[in-house]
Image (spheres, rainbow, N blue to C red):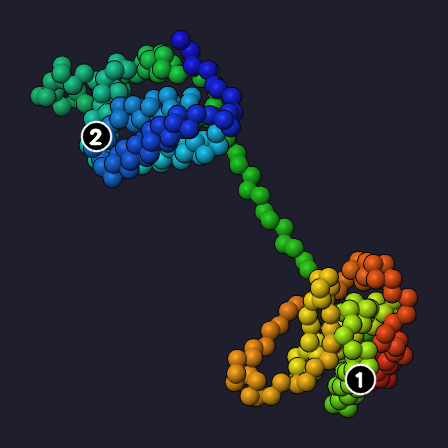
Amino acid sequence: MENTRLPYDPDQNAEEKRALRREYRAIHKNMEGIRQNIRDCTIDNLTDTVKRADKAFYKVKNTTEATLDSSVLMQLTASHAQMARSLKSGLGAFDMDDYLAKLITFMGGHDLDNQNPDDPDADDALLDAPLDWDQIGRRALAKSRRVPVVGFMLGPLSIEQKKRAPVKRAKFEKNKADERKPQEIKEEDIERSVNETTKNVATLESILEETGAVNLFRFVVNPESFAQSVENMFYLSFLIRDGKAALDTDEHGEPTIFGCAQPSDEDFTNGLRKRQIVFELDMATWERAIEVFEITEPIIPTRETAKTKIGNKWYG
């Protein structure tokens, strides 16, 4: 009866799957033994293992068992290659001279058994004897299905060596007129940016004291500017870091921000711990917050676009 491949079956019987995995583990163990004693292994041992793995393969219906089968196949391939290399490296028992002598005799050359050792001209006469190449050709053809072709034993009559043309690369020359010097940032420019941040943090602190506890999104979202909403979140993080503002959730689960007294060293000694969170405010969240909380006016007034002069240019 000819074996047929069974289709993929995710609901294969669990006991059948366990038995199949045990079989593949046994084959793996057998292959490890073969590879460790490859010199004592024979072709029959590998052939029996291939038949055993082939029999197990027709019970494979899931990807896990298919992976085990692939692993077995790779082990078999490696073992065959290792055996072939060992056979190739053990050609010391093969006598090339004896093989050529028997080959010449088979093609009708000198007969070693009938050679007269006392005749000094016997060797020269035997070397001049014609050889029947057709006889060895017919014997070799019986072992091969390849169609004989006409060719030369030393390859083609003429071989033209290809010369690689040298590649000339154009030299890249920089134009001095196109070179630009990096813009220099001075210390007063950095100080101006730090002072601007400190000023805006103080502004948010005073506004938070006036408003009291307020929804986080209502406080920081500016419906007129997404960029300033992100800036407001940035400035608010300094207040939370310094303990001047706290973030909590109300009874409805909404995030609420409110001012608080800055903790002292004694508070930290008594077990107060700082906690940090990462809040992402993208364009979609900003638009959604405006829609959900119906924000029409910003609590934090819209600031004028700050301009910084770096070198001879102004940046806003």
**Is residue 297 toward the left or the right of residue 2 in the image?**
right
Q: Secondary structure at mark 2?
A: loop
Name the residue carrying label 1. 206
Q: Secondary structure at mark 1?
A: helix
| Residue type at tag 2 | Asp
In front: label 1 or label 2 = 1
Where is 314 relative to 174, above or below? below
Kindly identify the residue that appears in the image at 90 percent across and 79 percent down.
304
Indicate the position of residue 150 as horizontal and vertical percent values: 48, 20
Indicate the position of residue 260 as horizontal and vertical percent values: 70, 82
Name the residue carrying label 2. 95
Where is 294 relative to 207, above or below? above
Seen as rendered, the residue at the extreme front is 251
Where is 151 relative to 199, above or below? above
Kindly identify the residue that appears in the image at 78 percent across and 82 percent down.
209
Seen as rendered, the residue at the extreme top is 1
Q: Residues within 10 Å of mark 2 (few under 14, many from 20)?
A: few
